[in-house]
Image (cartoon, rainbow, N blue to C red):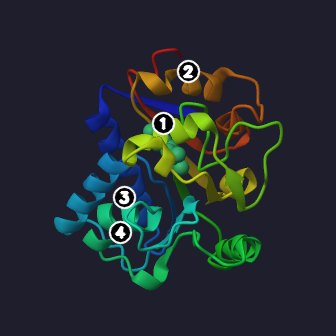
Amino acid sequence: MRILIGKDYEEISKKAALMVAAQVMLKPNSVLGLATGSTPLGLYRELIAMYQRGELDFSAVRTINLDEYYPLAPDDPQSYHYFMNDHLFKQINVKPENIHLPKGNADAVKAECDAYETMISQVGGIDLQVLGIGVNGHIGFNEPHPFLHAQTHLVDLTAETIQVNSRFFASAEEVPRQAVTMGMGTILKARRILLIASGRSKAEAIKKTVNGLVTTECPSSFLQTHPAVTLVLDQEAAALL
Ligand code: GLP
């Protein structure tokens, strides 16, 4: 695991953006695995700024997101589809047909999950997967549990995640109880992984990610088994290393 520590959120957002930009410049038709949450917002702002300055071209890039709330429709303002459009896609020149997220309101969820896996294989796999991390060590929505799923699946969110994510909703009651997420195997198949973490609330999870036992009770600990992971952390997130 490579660990880069920046002094604050702005600095790590810039470092992360340089890594994504390098990927796109080296391979213009890269498959980028993307994440939601507040952490990647600075990265997305930097990428948009680079695009606006004419430094980056997303016209051949394919994007594949980690997860989506179930059963939210893509046009629901609380959906991750909406979030990604708002914070990134509509502000860069990525082609709509090259954007992929799991459909949160699919009639047949299992078939949707299987189709998502097939689509990832058909585009040649993920070149660079961007990850945030939950305070409980979840990545995507792979929550701490006695066992994990390898492939894209429907998952029950933990009470802790519902509580933490309620800041984006009017109340905790409105947070969906389930989500469709890439599995641990899907994530670990990415050729490179870039995990960004900011703030003291992530320090414990980062400590377990880097130094803890590999355990399904801390899904991010599985990143220790991947050959090309970079963590970009601010000083607070790195405080317990
Ligand atoms: C959500 C997402 C994760 C994300 C996590 C952390 O639960 N499914 O992909 O990493 O939140 O969010 P934040 O970056 O807002 O702390």
Measure the C-alpha gap from mark 1 to mark 4: 23 Å
**Amino acid under label 3?**
Ala
Q: Up-down: is 78 above or below 94?
A: above
- Mark 3 or 1: the one toward you: 1
Which residue, given by chain and number where applicable, does mark 3 sit on? 21
Q: Residue furthest bottom?
A: 97
- Mark 1 or 4: the one toward you: 1
The residue located at (69%, 43%) in the rendering is 226
**Amino acid under label 4?**
Asn
Task: Give the mark nearer the N terminus: 2 vs 4.
Answer: 4
Which residue is more in the foreground, 219 or 143?
143
**Dot 2: element:** helix
The residue located at (31%, 60%) in the rendering is 87
Which residue, given by chain and number where applicable, does mark 2 sit on? 204
Q: Up-down: is 112 above or below 167?
A: below
Quarter of the image with the N terminus is: top right
Which residue, given by chain and number where applicable, does mark 4 sit on? 85
Q: Which mark is residue 12?
A: none
Task: Give the mark nearer the N terminus: 1 vs 4.
Answer: 4
**Amino acid under label 2?**
Glu
Measured from the top left, where is residue 217 in percent x and y?
74, 31
Measure the C-alpha gap from mark 2 to mark 3: 29 Å
**Dot 1: element:** helix
